[in-house]
Amino acid sequence: MTSRWRVAGAILPPSPWVARFLTLVRPGGLVLDLAAGAGRHVRLLRDRGFAVRAVDRDVSALRALSAPGCEIVEIDLESSAGWQLGSGYDGIVVTSYLHRPFFPVLAAALAPGGVVIYETFAVGNERFGQPSNPDFLLRPGELLAAFAGLTIVAFEEGEIHRPRQAMIQRIAARAGPPGALPE
């Protein structure tokens, strides 16, 4: 998957939203980076001591990041119905990717106290470029509804100006009651 967060061909640093909410993930825990792209979050996760499972349909950029504790999985997520994400994740990171059938699967894949950190494009982004297809843009409040069964830690939606102008939605949500800590 090609990252939508390239500016003049450069791969951007990790999302500040992701970096901010990684503190909620159990130290040393297993984190799934779904649609990992060029690996901007894989590096961050490894540097923070997490075990990482990075999944994407094109893992050519990710292969260089493979190391003990970092599993790279190459699969076309949208056409491989038989592939299972697994479960017991202490964290799940998804950025710049939207495949709505995964919403309930992601929530169910979290370990007790696990955290989903999700950030992607929303309706209105068509004014700023790609993606512009409504199938790939979140509707207002869609992430809140998708993860309503989790405890919402933070949610934002609206226009941003960095790393480039875009309409986004982002959420951090925990499996379990408010204040639940990972085991």
Image: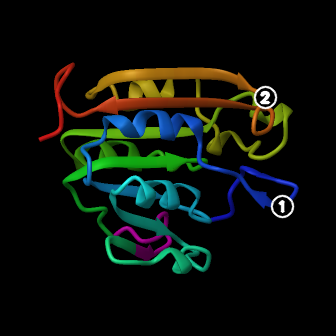
User: Residue 53, located in which quarter of the rendered image?
Assistant: bottom left
State the colouring used for the structure image.
rainbow
Inspect the image, locate mark 1, and give the three-letter code of the amino acid beneath it: Gly
Q: Residue at coordinates 54% horizontally, 34% vertically from top-left?
A: 17
Compare residues 28 and 144 and report the one nearer the observer. 28
Q: Which residues are magenta?
A: 72-82
Q: Which mark is residue 42?
A: none
- The residue identified by callout 2 is 161
Compare residues 132 and 64 and report the one nearer the observer. 64
Q: Which mark is residue 9?
A: 1
Compare residues 49 and 72 and report the one nearer the observer. 49
Q: Is residue 170 visible?
A: yes
Quadrant holding the N terminus: bottom right
Asked if residue 79 lies in the magenta stretch, the reply is: yes
SS at circle 1? loop
User: Residue 139, located in which quarter of the rendered image?
Assistant: top right
